[in-house]
Image (cartoon, rainbow, N blue to C red):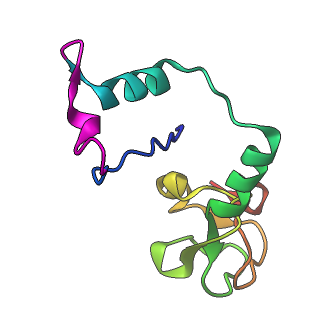
């Protein structure tokens, strides 16, 4: 997912509501939005690294014993996001711990078995 921020305020003193004024039969803001949608901007390496810090991971909310079945009651989501992402929760539920997992430890695929 890419995010583009297009600054557009309605409080212009010289031309009130200028972003919705028609220009060649389209609101002026249309041209900014259209260009943003057509752009092929890719995130920089630094932005990708920030994603990992801001994204969340599946984490043990309590100690999980070896061979214990993983359920929603012993999981939570915390930052940073270099573990299994929360959108894959259904793939994790029902699996068993290969070894003991400590409270607040990120879940990794190597810690789980079917």
- Decide: is 47 above or below 77: above
Q: Where is residue 61 in the image (x, y as percent from the top left)?
A: 60, 83
Rendering quarter of residue 78: bottom right
Q: Does the magenta stretch include residue 21?
A: yes
Front one among 47 and 89:
47
Front one among 38 and 12:
12
- Secondary structure that dominates the magenta span: loop
- Decide: is 58 above or below 113: below
Q: Which residue lies furthest to the front in this view?
A: 14
Name the quarter where the C terminus is drawn. bottom right
Is residue 75 visible from the viewing direction of this image?
A: yes
Q: Position of residue 26 (x, y in %)?
A: 22, 19
Rendering quarter of residue 43: top right
Q: Is residue 59 magenta?
A: no
Is residue 109 visible from the viewing direction of this image?
A: no
Rendering quarter of residue 27: top left
Front one among 5 and 114:
5
Q: Position of residue 104 (x, y in %)?
A: 70, 81
From the viewer's perspective, is 31 left or right of 16? Answer: right
From the viewer's perspective, is 114 left or right of 53? Answer: left
Q: Give the range drawn in magenta.
A: 13-25
Residue at screen point 75% across, 83% down? 102
Q: Where is residue 95 in the image (x, y as percent from the top left)?
A: 58, 61
From the viewer's perspective, is 1 left or right of 19? Answer: right
Count of numbered labels shown in the rendering: 0
- Decide: is 18 above or below 57: above
- Decide: is 41 above or below 2: above
Residue at screen point 62% across, 59% down? 55
From the viewer's perspective, is 110 left or right of 37? Answer: right
Residue at screen point 68% across, 60% down? 81
Front one among 7 and 70:
7
């Amino acid at each position: 997912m890419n995010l583009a921020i297009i600054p557009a305020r309605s409080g212009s003193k010289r031309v009130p509501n200028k972003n919705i004024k028609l220009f060649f039969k389209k609101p002026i803001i249309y041209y900014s939005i259209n260009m943003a949608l057509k752009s092929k901007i890719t995130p920089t390496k630094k932005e990708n690294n920030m994603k990992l810090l801001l994204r969340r991971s599946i984490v043990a909310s309590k100690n999980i014993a070896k061979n214990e079945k993983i359920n929603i009651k012993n999981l939570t989501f915390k930052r940073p996001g270099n573990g299994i992402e929360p959108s894959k929760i259904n793939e994790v539920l029902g699996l068993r711990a290969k070894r003991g997992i400590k409270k607040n430890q990120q879940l990794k695929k190597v810690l789980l078995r079917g």
